[in-house]
Amino acid sequence: MRFTEKFLLKGAVAALTTFIAIAAAPLAQAAKDQSVAVGELGACEVRNGKAKCWGLDNLYSTTPSPSGVRSIAVGKFHKCAITDLGISCWGDNSQNQLDVPPVFGPTAIVAAGDNTCATGDDGVTCWGSALGEIASIPELSNPVDLAISEKHACALDDGGVKCWGDNSLHQTDVPALDQPTAVAVGDAHSCALTAQGVKCWGDNSKHQLDVPPLDQPTQISVGGNASCALTGVGGVVCWGDAGGCASST
């Protein structure tokens, strides 16, 4: 999941039945919304500084959302938002999801599972999952893109793509990449948009790494065991365990 939410695939593509359930939410004027965030079991929209959320995860989110919301991230059973006053989180706290460490000048936020990461004046800060797979953040120089899963994370900075966390399926072993411009991660695989197209690495049990021919890809979105790319001709191409998320051209 990435902090640059450019098209609505995100973690929902990992569970098609969940995606169908939350897609029925009242988004008749979605084009006018400031932003939309989708998690494994729920979603939120931000409009005029207020967040409206729905989905199964709301069973664990009894605390009202804050005001002055600039952007929001949706985890499995928690949500975090950048507000006029800083970062505010609500929902389940069984894995310390709500224990927000100091983040000065937060600019972007992303969540997955029990984890949350934010970019700020001091780089990237992560908190949440008691297992702490993504807590050991490598040194980053001016991170411009960030993506996390429940067990690993990747960032794009001045030095290229750096990944950390669980590496049991080589999802953090970054291959040689030609001028990467964006990064995205799934459960156990990672992808980058580069000058040569889309490159993926890590788990390939569901053909996550078998990137099909893409006509001038411009954006990527990854969730679960599936990946999708927006092409320069306006189509969407998906691969891996994409279920019923058919490609369009």
Image (cartoon, rainbow, N blue to C red):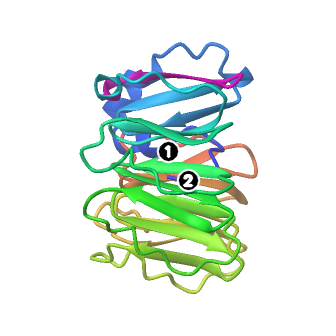
Name the residue: 39% across, 44% down.
Answer: 98
Percent position of residue 2, x then y? 55, 53
The foreground one among 249 and 177 is: 177
Instruction: Tell me if residue 213 can be seen.
Output: no
Residue that carries the numbered disc 2 in the rendered image = 2
| Residue 55 among those drawn in magenta | yes
Q: How many residues crowd mark 1 within 10 Å: few (<14), some (14–19), many (20+)?
A: many
Q: Which mark is residue 10?
A: 1
Q: Is residue 24 left or right of residue 29?
A: left
Q: Main secondary structure of the magenta part?
A: strand
For the C terminus, the quadrant is top right
Q: Secondary structure at mark 1?
A: helix
| Cα–Cα gap, marks 2 and 1 | 8 Å
Q: Position of residue 149 (x, y in %)?
A: 40, 57
Between discs 2 and 1, the one toward the N terminus: 2
Q: Is residue 144 magenta?
A: no
Q: Where is residue 154 shown, x and y percent of the image?
A: 51, 69
Q: Residues within 10 Å of mark 2 (few under 14, many from 20)?
A: many
User: Please, what is the three-letter code of the amino acid marked with disc 2?
Assistant: Arg
Q: Is residue 240 above or below residue 13?
A: below
